[in-house]
Image (cartoon, rainbow, N blue to C red):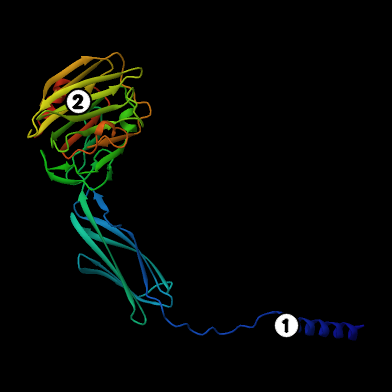
Amino acid sequence: MKSIKTIFTFFLVALLAASCEDYLDPIKKVPTANDVSVPQVTINFPTEGKVIQASEEVATLTIHVIATDDIELKSVTLQLDGEQIASLSSFKDYRRADIAYDYTELTDGDHSLTVRAEDLTGKNETKTVNFSKITIPTYEPLDGEVLYFPFDGHSIDLISQTPAALEGTPGFATGKVGEAYAGATDAYLTYPADSVTKGSEFSVSFWYKINADPPRGGILAISPPGESRNSGLRLFRENSGDNQNIGLNFGIGEAEVWINPVTTVPPTQDWMHIVLSISTTHTTIYIDGAIAVEQDIDAQISWTDCTSISIASGMPNFGYWEHYSDLSLYDEMHFFTKALTAEEVQSLFAVK
Protein backbone atom coordinates (compact mmCIF):
# COMPACT_ATOMS: atom_id res chain seq x y z
CA MET A 1 0.00 0.00 0.00
CA LYS A 2 2.87 2.35 0.89
CA SER A 3 4.46 1.67 -2.49
CA ILE A 4 1.25 2.51 -4.33
CA LYS A 5 0.96 5.84 -2.46
CA THR A 6 4.57 6.67 -3.27
CA ILE A 7 4.05 5.93 -6.96
CA PHE A 8 0.85 8.00 -7.04
CA THR A 9 2.55 10.98 -5.38
CA PHE A 10 5.44 10.82 -7.84
CA PHE A 11 3.02 10.65 -10.75
CA LEU A 12 1.04 13.70 -9.47
CA VAL A 13 4.19 15.81 -9.06
CA ALA A 14 5.34 14.90 -12.56
CA LEU A 15 1.94 15.79 -13.97
CA LEU A 16 1.97 19.23 -12.31
CA ALA A 17 5.46 19.89 -13.58
CA ALA A 18 4.38 19.05 -17.09
CA SER A 19 1.38 21.35 -16.77
CA CYS A 20 3.58 24.21 -15.69
CA GLU A 21 5.86 23.55 -18.61
CA ASP A 22 3.00 23.50 -21.13
CA TYR A 23 0.65 26.22 -19.88
CA LEU A 24 2.57 28.89 -17.92
CA ASP A 25 4.60 31.48 -19.78
CA PRO A 26 8.23 31.55 -18.68
CA ILE A 27 9.67 34.84 -17.40
CA LYS A 28 11.47 36.61 -20.19
CA LYS A 29 13.71 39.62 -19.99
CA VAL A 30 12.24 42.61 -21.80
CA PRO A 31 14.90 44.57 -23.66
CA THR A 32 15.12 48.32 -22.93
CA ALA A 33 13.18 50.33 -25.50
CA ASN A 34 14.67 53.17 -27.47
CA ASP A 35 14.07 56.64 -26.03
CA VAL A 36 12.14 58.27 -28.86
CA SER A 37 9.70 60.71 -27.19
CA VAL A 38 10.27 64.20 -25.87
CA PRO A 39 9.24 64.66 -22.20
CA GLN A 40 5.78 66.08 -21.62
CA VAL A 41 5.07 68.93 -19.18
CA THR A 42 1.68 69.88 -17.73
CA ILE A 43 1.35 72.92 -15.42
CA ASN A 44 -1.81 72.38 -13.39
CA PHE A 45 -1.33 75.43 -11.15
CA PRO A 46 -1.03 78.31 -11.63
CA THR A 47 -2.92 78.41 -14.90
CA GLU A 48 -2.47 80.95 -17.69
CA GLY A 49 -3.92 84.33 -16.65
CA LYS A 50 -4.64 83.21 -13.09
CA VAL A 51 -4.94 85.97 -10.48
CA ILE A 52 -3.58 84.76 -7.15
CA GLN A 53 -5.42 86.43 -4.26
CA ALA A 54 -3.93 86.60 -0.80
CA SER A 55 -4.36 88.69 2.32
CA GLU A 56 -0.58 88.68 2.80
CA GLU A 57 1.69 90.96 0.77
CA VAL A 58 4.22 88.10 0.53
CA ALA A 59 2.36 84.81 0.03
CA THR A 60 3.01 81.12 -0.55
CA LEU A 61 2.30 79.74 -4.02
CA THR A 62 1.89 75.97 -4.35
CA ILE A 63 3.05 75.07 -7.86
CA HIS A 64 1.61 71.83 -9.24
CA VAL A 65 3.41 70.28 -12.22
CA ILE A 66 3.36 66.85 -13.88
CA ALA A 67 6.27 65.76 -16.09
CA THR A 68 6.41 62.43 -17.97
CA ASP A 69 8.80 60.59 -20.29
CA ASP A 70 8.59 57.34 -22.24
CA ILE A 71 11.79 55.94 -20.69
CA GLU A 72 13.18 58.00 -17.81
CA LEU A 73 13.23 61.60 -16.59
CA LYS A 74 16.57 63.12 -15.75
CA SER A 75 15.49 66.46 -14.25
CA VAL A 76 12.68 68.97 -13.82
CA THR A 77 13.51 72.63 -13.17
CA LEU A 78 11.24 75.49 -12.15
CA GLN A 79 11.93 79.13 -12.96
CA LEU A 80 9.96 82.12 -11.71
CA ASP A 81 10.47 85.38 -13.56
CA GLY A 82 13.69 84.03 -15.09
CA GLU A 83 15.23 82.86 -11.79
CA GLN A 84 15.56 79.16 -10.96
CA ILE A 85 13.66 78.31 -7.78
CA ALA A 86 13.88 74.49 -7.85
CA SER A 87 15.70 71.65 -9.60
CA LEU A 88 14.58 68.05 -9.09
CA SER A 89 16.42 64.94 -10.24
CA SER A 90 15.10 62.15 -8.00
CA PHE A 91 11.60 60.78 -8.58
CA LYS A 92 9.60 57.91 -7.06
CA ASP A 93 8.38 57.00 -10.53
CA TYR A 94 11.26 57.58 -12.95
CA ARG A 95 8.83 58.02 -15.88
CA ARG A 96 6.35 60.36 -14.14
CA ALA A 97 7.00 63.19 -11.72
CA ASP A 98 4.00 64.62 -9.85
CA ILE A 99 5.43 67.75 -8.25
CA ALA A 100 3.86 70.06 -5.65
CA TYR A 101 6.36 72.78 -4.80
CA ASP A 102 5.75 75.59 -2.27
CA TYR A 103 7.27 78.92 -3.25
CA THR A 104 7.07 81.12 -0.15
CA GLU A 105 8.07 84.55 -1.47
CA LEU A 106 5.37 85.50 -3.99
CA THR A 107 4.86 89.26 -4.15
CA ASP A 108 2.27 91.44 -5.90
CA GLY A 109 2.56 91.92 -9.65
CA ASP A 110 2.78 89.99 -12.90
CA HIS A 111 4.77 86.75 -12.91
CA SER A 112 5.97 84.09 -15.33
CA LEU A 113 6.51 80.43 -14.40
CA THR A 114 8.68 78.26 -16.69
CA VAL A 115 8.98 74.48 -16.24
CA ARG A 116 11.65 72.46 -18.09
CA ALA A 117 11.75 68.64 -18.16
CA GLU A 118 14.74 66.72 -19.57
CA ASP A 119 15.20 62.97 -20.18
CA LEU A 120 18.38 60.85 -20.05
CA THR A 121 19.16 61.45 -23.72
CA GLY A 122 18.98 65.23 -23.42
CA LYS A 123 15.59 65.70 -25.06
CA ASN A 124 13.57 68.35 -23.24
CA GLU A 125 10.33 70.31 -23.22
CA THR A 126 9.62 73.74 -21.72
CA LYS A 127 6.23 75.20 -20.77
CA THR A 128 5.47 78.72 -19.51
CA VAL A 129 2.40 80.27 -17.89
CA ASN A 130 1.81 83.91 -16.98
CA PHE A 131 -0.14 84.89 -13.88
CA SER A 132 -0.39 87.67 -11.32
CA LYS A 133 -0.70 88.13 -7.58
CA ILE A 134 -2.62 90.78 -5.65
CA THR A 135 -3.06 91.52 -1.98
CA ILE A 136 -6.71 91.57 -0.98
CA PRO A 137 -7.21 93.77 2.10
CA THR A 138 -9.47 92.72 4.93
CA TYR A 139 -12.84 94.45 4.54
CA GLU A 140 -15.62 94.95 7.09
CA PRO A 141 -19.01 95.23 5.29
CA LEU A 142 -21.23 98.21 5.91
CA ASP A 143 -24.70 97.72 7.38
CA GLY A 144 -26.73 95.63 4.92
CA GLU A 145 -23.86 95.42 2.42
CA VAL A 146 -23.55 92.12 0.53
CA LEU A 147 -21.10 92.89 -2.33
CA TYR A 148 -18.24 95.36 -2.72
CA PHE A 149 -16.17 95.74 -5.88
CA PRO A 150 -13.36 98.32 -5.45
CA PHE A 151 -12.02 97.50 -8.97
CA ASP A 152 -8.44 98.16 -7.88
CA GLY A 153 -6.91 96.23 -10.76
CA HIS A 154 -9.22 93.25 -10.20
CA SER A 155 -12.91 92.30 -10.25
CA ILE A 156 -13.02 90.67 -6.80
CA ASP A 157 -15.86 91.12 -4.33
CA LEU A 158 -14.01 91.87 -1.09
CA ILE A 159 -16.79 90.48 1.10
CA SER A 160 -16.79 86.97 -0.35
CA GLN A 161 -13.23 87.22 -1.79
CA THR A 162 -14.71 85.89 -5.05
CA PRO A 163 -14.01 87.42 -8.48
CA ALA A 164 -16.71 88.34 -10.95
CA ALA A 165 -16.57 86.47 -14.25
CA LEU A 166 -15.05 88.46 -17.11
CA GLU A 167 -16.62 88.39 -20.54
CA GLY A 168 -14.36 89.71 -23.29
CA THR A 169 -11.27 91.73 -22.42
CA PRO A 170 -12.08 94.74 -20.24
CA GLY A 171 -9.31 96.67 -18.53
CA PHE A 172 -8.53 99.05 -15.70
CA ALA A 173 -7.74 102.76 -15.64
CA THR A 174 -7.17 105.58 -13.18
CA GLY A 175 -10.23 105.63 -10.97
CA LYS A 176 -11.96 107.91 -8.55
CA VAL A 177 -10.22 105.95 -5.80
CA GLY A 178 -7.19 103.96 -6.93
CA GLU A 179 -8.06 102.11 -10.14
CA ALA A 180 -11.41 101.69 -11.93
CA TYR A 181 -13.00 99.12 -14.20
CA ALA A 182 -12.69 100.26 -17.84
CA GLY A 183 -15.37 98.93 -20.16
CA ALA A 184 -14.53 97.58 -23.61
CA THR A 185 -16.44 96.44 -26.69
CA ASP A 186 -18.18 93.08 -26.10
CA ALA A 187 -16.90 93.04 -22.52
CA TYR A 188 -18.64 93.04 -19.14
CA LEU A 189 -18.69 91.42 -15.71
CA THR A 190 -21.17 88.89 -14.35
CA TYR A 191 -21.71 87.72 -10.79
CA PRO A 192 -24.28 85.45 -9.10
CA ALA A 193 -27.26 87.47 -7.88
CA ASP A 194 -28.33 85.29 -4.96
CA SER A 195 -26.80 87.52 -2.28
CA VAL A 196 -28.68 90.54 -3.67
CA THR A 197 -32.01 88.92 -4.52
CA LYS A 198 -32.63 87.48 -1.06
CA GLY A 199 -33.84 90.88 0.16
CA SER A 200 -37.05 92.84 -0.33
CA GLU A 201 -35.09 96.11 -0.51
CA PHE A 202 -32.13 97.05 -2.69
CA SER A 203 -29.46 99.71 -3.03
CA VAL A 204 -26.35 100.13 -5.15
CA SER A 205 -23.75 102.89 -4.93
CA PHE A 206 -20.90 103.55 -7.36
CA TRP A 207 -18.76 106.16 -9.12
CA TYR A 208 -19.31 106.46 -12.87
CA LYS A 209 -17.44 108.31 -15.63
CA ILE A 210 -19.47 108.20 -18.80
CA ASN A 211 -18.20 107.34 -22.26
CA ALA A 212 -20.94 108.27 -24.74
CA ASP A 213 -19.56 106.03 -27.51
CA PRO A 214 -21.44 103.91 -28.46
CA PRO A 215 -24.63 106.01 -28.13
CA ARG A 216 -26.38 103.37 -25.96
CA GLY A 217 -25.18 100.98 -23.29
CA GLY A 218 -26.19 98.90 -20.33
CA ILE A 219 -24.83 100.07 -16.98
CA LEU A 220 -26.21 97.52 -14.52
CA ALA A 221 -28.65 94.65 -15.11
CA ILE A 222 -30.13 92.10 -12.72
CA SER A 223 -32.67 90.84 -15.19
CA PRO A 224 -34.52 87.61 -16.07
CA PRO A 225 -33.99 85.99 -19.49
CA GLY A 226 -36.04 87.34 -22.39
CA GLU A 227 -37.84 90.66 -22.68
CA SER A 228 -39.47 90.39 -19.28
CA ARG A 229 -39.39 93.50 -17.09
CA ASN A 230 -41.90 92.73 -14.32
CA SER A 231 -38.96 91.54 -12.25
CA GLY A 232 -35.34 92.54 -11.89
CA LEU A 233 -33.60 95.86 -12.44
CA ARG A 234 -32.04 97.60 -15.45
CA LEU A 235 -29.94 100.76 -15.37
CA PHE A 236 -28.88 102.09 -18.77
CA ARG A 237 -27.84 105.11 -20.83
CA GLU A 238 -29.14 106.42 -24.17
CA ASN A 239 -28.23 109.36 -26.36
CA SER A 240 -30.49 112.41 -26.25
CA GLY A 241 -29.26 114.84 -28.86
CA ASP A 242 -25.77 115.83 -27.82
CA ASN A 243 -26.33 114.55 -24.26
CA GLN A 244 -26.88 111.23 -22.52
CA ASN A 245 -29.95 110.19 -20.55
CA ILE A 246 -29.42 107.75 -17.69
CA GLY A 247 -32.58 105.72 -17.14
CA LEU A 248 -33.90 103.08 -14.73
CA ASN A 249 -36.44 100.29 -15.08
CA PHE A 250 -37.36 97.64 -12.50
CA GLY A 251 -40.16 95.13 -11.96
CA ILE A 252 -42.58 94.88 -9.03
CA GLY A 253 -44.32 91.62 -9.91
CA GLU A 254 -47.47 92.67 -11.75
CA ALA A 255 -45.97 95.77 -13.38
CA GLU A 256 -42.76 97.57 -14.28
CA VAL A 257 -41.53 100.94 -13.05
CA TRP A 258 -39.85 103.46 -15.36
CA ILE A 259 -37.75 106.42 -14.29
CA ASN A 260 -36.34 107.73 -17.55
CA PRO A 261 -34.45 109.92 -17.47
CA VAL A 262 -33.00 109.80 -14.01
CA THR A 263 -30.63 112.52 -15.13
CA THR A 264 -29.26 114.01 -18.36
CA VAL A 265 -25.54 114.62 -18.64
CA PRO A 266 -23.14 115.87 -21.32
CA PRO A 267 -20.90 113.27 -22.98
CA THR A 268 -17.83 114.86 -21.40
CA GLN A 269 -19.24 114.39 -17.89
CA ASP A 270 -16.60 113.94 -15.20
CA TRP A 271 -16.92 111.39 -12.40
CA MET A 272 -20.42 111.25 -10.96
CA HIS A 273 -21.67 109.35 -7.92
CA ILE A 274 -24.86 107.31 -8.46
CA VAL A 275 -27.00 105.68 -5.76
CA LEU A 276 -30.21 103.72 -6.35
CA SER A 277 -32.19 103.16 -3.15
CA ILE A 278 -35.37 101.07 -3.40
CA SER A 279 -37.49 100.30 -0.34
CA THR A 280 -40.72 98.30 -0.37
CA THR A 281 -42.73 101.48 -1.02
CA HIS A 282 -40.39 104.16 -2.36
CA THR A 283 -37.53 104.73 -4.80
CA THR A 284 -34.89 107.42 -4.37
CA ILE A 285 -32.05 108.09 -6.79
CA TYR A 286 -29.13 110.24 -5.74
CA ILE A 287 -26.61 111.93 -8.03
CA ASP A 288 -23.50 113.32 -6.33
CA GLY A 289 -25.08 112.98 -2.92
CA ALA A 290 -28.28 114.90 -3.75
CA ILE A 291 -31.73 113.52 -4.61
CA ALA A 292 -32.17 113.56 -8.39
CA VAL A 293 -35.60 111.91 -8.50
CA GLU A 294 -37.87 109.92 -6.19
CA GLN A 295 -41.29 108.32 -6.37
CA ASP A 296 -43.58 105.91 -4.56
CA ILE A 297 -44.02 102.36 -5.84
CA ASP A 298 -47.02 100.04 -5.46
CA ALA A 299 -45.10 96.93 -4.41
CA GLN A 300 -41.60 95.78 -3.52
CA ILE A 301 -39.09 94.90 -6.22
CA SER A 302 -39.44 91.38 -7.61
CA TRP A 303 -36.43 89.16 -8.26
CA THR A 304 -38.27 86.34 -10.03
CA ASP A 305 -35.92 84.40 -12.38
CA CYS A 306 -33.04 86.82 -11.74
CA THR A 307 -29.90 84.74 -11.27
CA SER A 308 -27.01 86.98 -12.31
CA ILE A 309 -25.72 90.53 -12.13
CA SER A 310 -24.24 92.17 -15.24
CA ILE A 311 -21.96 95.18 -14.78
CA ALA A 312 -21.07 97.51 -17.68
CA SER A 313 -23.54 95.89 -20.08
CA GLY A 314 -27.15 94.81 -20.37
CA MET A 315 -25.96 91.47 -21.72
CA PRO A 316 -26.85 88.69 -21.64
CA ASN A 317 -30.46 89.34 -20.53
CA PHE A 318 -30.97 93.05 -21.27
CA GLY A 319 -29.15 93.39 -24.57
CA TYR A 320 -32.30 94.29 -26.41
CA TRP A 321 -32.80 97.93 -27.46
CA GLU A 322 -29.02 98.01 -28.06
CA HIS A 323 -28.10 98.12 -24.38
CA TYR A 324 -24.81 96.37 -25.04
CA SER A 325 -21.37 96.86 -23.49
CA ASP A 326 -20.60 100.21 -21.94
CA LEU A 327 -17.11 101.68 -22.41
CA SER A 328 -17.41 103.94 -19.37
CA LEU A 329 -15.40 103.77 -16.11
CA TYR A 330 -16.78 102.23 -12.89
CA ASP A 331 -15.38 102.49 -9.39
CA GLU A 332 -16.22 101.67 -5.74
CA MET A 333 -19.40 99.65 -6.36
CA HIS A 334 -21.37 98.63 -3.24
CA PHE A 335 -24.54 96.48 -3.19
CA PHE A 336 -27.00 96.37 -0.27
CA THR A 337 -30.15 94.47 0.66
CA LYS A 338 -31.61 97.57 2.29
CA ALA A 339 -32.71 101.04 1.27
CA LEU A 340 -29.96 103.51 2.10
CA THR A 341 -30.66 106.59 4.16
CA ALA A 342 -29.58 110.08 3.07
CA GLU A 343 -26.86 109.98 5.75
CA GLU A 344 -25.49 106.68 4.41
CA VAL A 345 -25.48 108.08 0.88
CA GLN A 346 -23.50 111.11 2.05
CA SER A 347 -20.99 108.85 3.74
CA LEU A 348 -20.42 106.85 0.52
CA PHE A 349 -20.23 110.05 -1.54
CA ALA A 350 -17.60 111.48 0.83
CA VAL A 351 -15.13 108.69 -0.01
CA LYS A 352 -13.08 110.39 -2.73
Looking at numbered disc 1 in the image, what kind of residue is underneath it? Asp
Q: Which residue is mark 2?
A: 247
State the quadrant of the N terminus: bottom right
Q: Residue 63 location, x and y as percent?
A: 31, 61
For the point 19% across and 42% down, the residue is 183
Depth order, front residue of 211/89 = 211
Please determine whether, in this image, residue 88 is positioned above or below residue 102.
below
Total number of numbered discs in the rendering: 2
Depth order, front residue of 217/29 = 217
Quarter holding residue 324: top left
> Which mark, residue 157?
none
Please determine whether, in this image, residue 153 is positioned above or below residue 302.
below
Q: Residue 131 location, x and y as percent?
A: 24, 57
Quarter holding residue 337: top left
Disc 1 crowd, CA 10 A, few/some/many (<14, 14-19, 20+)? few
| Residue 138 can be seen in this image | yes
Depth order, front residue of 298/318 = 318
State the quadrant of the C terminus: top left
| Residue 146 can be seen in this image | no
Helix, strand or loop for disc 2: strand
Quarter holding residue 119: bottom left
Q: Residue 308 location, x and y as percent?
A: 32, 35
CA gap, disc 1 to disc 2? Answer: 90 Å
For the point 24% across and 40% down, the residue is 158
Query: Depth-wise, is mark 1 or mark 2 nearer the camera?
Result: 2
Helix, strand or loop for disc 1: helix
Instruction: Tell me: 109 left or right of 67.
Output: left
For the point 24% across and 43% down, the residue is 187
For the point 11% across and 28% down, the residue is 241
Q: Residue 6 location, x and y as percent?
A: 85, 85
Mark nearer the N terminus (1 vs 2): 1
Q: Which residue is mark 1?
A: 22
